[in-house]
Image (cartoon, grey):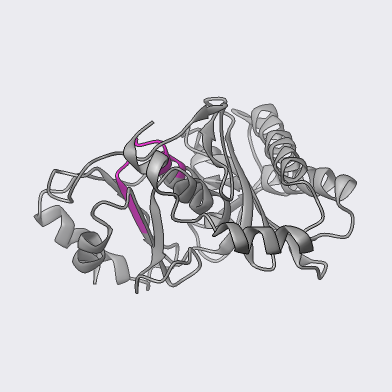
Amino acid sequence: MSRSANEVRRGAPSAETWQDERVEFQESIEAVLETAVTAAKAAGSIHRQFAGRALHVRTKSSASDLVTEVDALAEAAIREVILARFPDHAILGEEEGAVGSSPARWVVDPLDGTVNYAHGFPVSCASVAFEWNGRRLAGAVYDQGRDELFTATLGGGAFLNGAPLAVSTTPSVSAPALLATGFPYDPEDTRNFERFRRLLAMGVPIRRPGAAALDLCYVAAGRLDGYWEFGLHPWDAAAGSLIVEEAGGRVTDGGGASTPYGEMILATNGLFHSELLGALA
């Protein structure tokens, strides 16, 4: 494992803080992660079932913001798994919104990369995260097409199909780093255009895969060195951001605050985070 994963987990709490939280949090973190994995794989099973079929596609916020019956069926499967194990927990999902009120909350994206999925472009996944009092404790992201399961628990490391993950050791943006980004569905939202152009002019290779949760997991796996995007929702980033942090990376908003829920998210291997923040300012 690389230096980053061995020496630094930026998302990990102090021993005292985590001990205090475990007094409040009565469930086993292993049980929570197991539920996240089961839920993500249940959604993945539905993804596989409908892959390649003609889908009923409709739009949401714009003509390019698609939703299919697979999104709804996958979220129902996720909710069924969670509530069978933890009936008192709250759930925030992309399709059905927020249900329940509890310090224990699940944040789920039943099909991240719906546009890709609807076109048969093989970049999509299910994302399931668990929070306690707003703190991300466990996450699972399942890419059904590649049968890749990314998981993490707070302070417990990040894994891909059970093998430890570590971020890359690329030292700077100009190394060059391989970056990914995304663009909002709203055609009036042009915040990222100039930043994208600026980095291209620096000779930085940039990819646009189209599934935020997988972009984050690829940073955790060292496949990407960094990723940024504007306008994400909590379900886009909750699980993937924890996986990055537990793999030794860093996740902040555009101002450098340690949160994945800001106006902009930036995830890197941690070695050139400040440099990239400056380039994106």
Measured from the top left, where is residue 129 in percent x and y? 64, 51
Residue 131 seen by the camera: yes
Measured from the top left, where is residue 86 in percent x and y? 86, 51
Q: Nearer the viewer, residue 225 or 32?
A: 32
Q: Which residues are magenta?
A: 217-228
- Whether residue 209 sits left or right of residue 170 in the image: it is right
Q: Is residue 36 above or below residue 130?
A: above
Residue 110 seen by the camera: no
Q: Quadrant of the N terminus?
A: top left
Q: Residue placed at 57% from the left, 27% from the top?
A: 162
Q: Is residue 15 above or below residue 221?
A: below
Q: Residue placed at 45% from the left, 62% from the top?
A: 185
Quadrant of res 101? bottom right
Measured from the top left, where is residue 22 in percent x and y? 73, 57
In magenta segment, residue 221: yes
Q: Residue placed at 89% from the left, 45% from the top?
A: 84
Quadrant of res 24? bottom right
Q: Nearer the viewer, residue 178 or 184?
A: 178
Residue found at the far front of this picture: 16
Measured from the top left, where is residue 259 in percent x and y? 48, 66
Q: Nearer the viewer, residue 127 or 5?
A: 5
